[in-house]
Amino acid sequence: MLFKNLRHIGAFAAVAVLSTAPASAQQETFGEYLDIVAQHARSEGVSQATIDRVFTGLSPNDRVLALDRDNVSSSGNNTSTGFPSMAGYLNRHNTASRINGGVRKLSEVRSIGYDVERQYGVPAEIVVAIWGHETAYGAVMGSFDLPRSLATLAWEGRRRELFERELIDVLKMVDMGVPRSRLVGSWAGAFGNGQFLPSVYLRLAVDGDGDGQKDLWNSDVDTMHSIANYFRDAGWRTGEPWAVRAYVPNSADRSGIENRVVSPVCPRVHERHSRWLTVREWRERGIEPRAPIGDDVMASLFEPDGPAEPGYLLTQNYKVILEYNCSNYYAMSVGLLADEISR
């Protein structure tokens, strides 16, 4: 998932030399740091019983620190764009197995999908595509102890504010009744079918089946409702596609379409998109959408592998997918997977 943008674990960290000592100026021991967190948690209403249950016996995880510092893409660059090949990424991630798994899952949750679409306005295939990319439809949800991972990353100190917040929020989840044994997930603290972080779980998880639990580990209903709620909260526009394939002839008028706005978040992601124009204005420039889309819809031209390769007109809903994980590769693969599994 990204952490705003890492609310999910999608961002890459720079390679650094591993050190088991914290990066904070205080250089406190792990135990001393947990005492500090416990004080902060108590001030936010977390019970001492929960703190004791979660923190007793906790120790730093060197494997988590190693993964945090080695989370860098090794893909080669596309010589025409200076970025890794989008086609190559899609070939590796949107495999026949993942597409077929998505078709089966969408069939299994069809009745839930209808309810989700009515309540949140988010297509079921988009929700299922997120599920597929995050955990292979629930097959791979991670095996790291969440409190231990989050405490390790917070203690290390480079992103203490971020990870301490998540650590306190995972304590709040236990206070709410989430079993300690269920707190297992990715090395960076994401968990469940949709790989929510604790802060996202507290804010947006939904008890879709009304059983008194927000079970993102075992409940298809709660998973679908929660992911859809995330998308609605991020601004999903009902009835608008995430993008459409576009025909971009060599004669297309490209004058003045460069994006001159620097995004305050994930600028390297957004710098690859053109300025935003209406679909009607793109048509006037000779660029034709290959699927239904309203003439008044605002769209940005994206040619991920260069002018000679497939182009897309992105909509606001593409930016919503980026909220889940701020990566063009991720967002494109989610959108295209959703298109495939809904055919």
Image (spheres, rainbow, N blue to C red):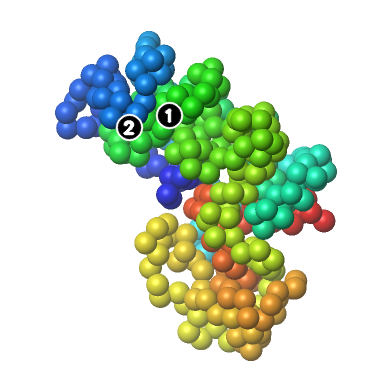
- Does 52 appear above or below 251? above
- Does 265 appear above or below 228? below
Q: Residue at x 69, y 36 (%)?
A: 209
Q: Position of residue 171 (x, y in %)?
A: 41, 26
Mark 1 Cα shell of 10 Å, populated few (<14), some (14-19), many (≥20): many
Label placed on residue 172: 1
Residue furthest out toward the bottom:
284
Q: Mark 1 or mark 2, which has the lower sequence index?
A: 2
Label 1 sits on a secondary structure element that is helix
Q: Residue at x 23, y 19 (%)?
A: 32
Q: Position of residue 167 (x, y in %)?
A: 38, 30
Q: Position of residue 231 (x, y in %)?
A: 58, 53
- Residue type at mark 2 is Glu
Q: Position of residue 255 (x, y in %)?
A: 51, 86
Mark 2 Cα shell of 10 Å, populated few (<14), some (14-19), many (≥20): few
Q: Is residue 124 left or right of residue 70?
A: right
Q: Residue at x 42, y 57 (%)?
A: 266
Q: Is residue 260 left or right of residue 337?
A: left
Q: Mark 2 sits on what residue?
A: 44
Q: Is residue 229 left or right of residue 128?
A: left
> Is the C-beta separation of discs 1 and 2 under 8 Å?
yes
- Residue type at mark 1 is Lys
Alpha carbons under labels 1 and 2: distance apart: 9 Å
Label placed on residue 313: none
Which quarter shows the C terminus?
bottom right
Residue 202 shows in this picture: yes
Label 2 sits on a secondary structure element that is loop
Residue furthest out toward the left:
26
> Viewer-proximal residue, 267 or 229?
229
**Quarter-wise, where is residue 342 in the image?**
bottom right
**Quarter-wise, where is residue 107 in the image?**
top right
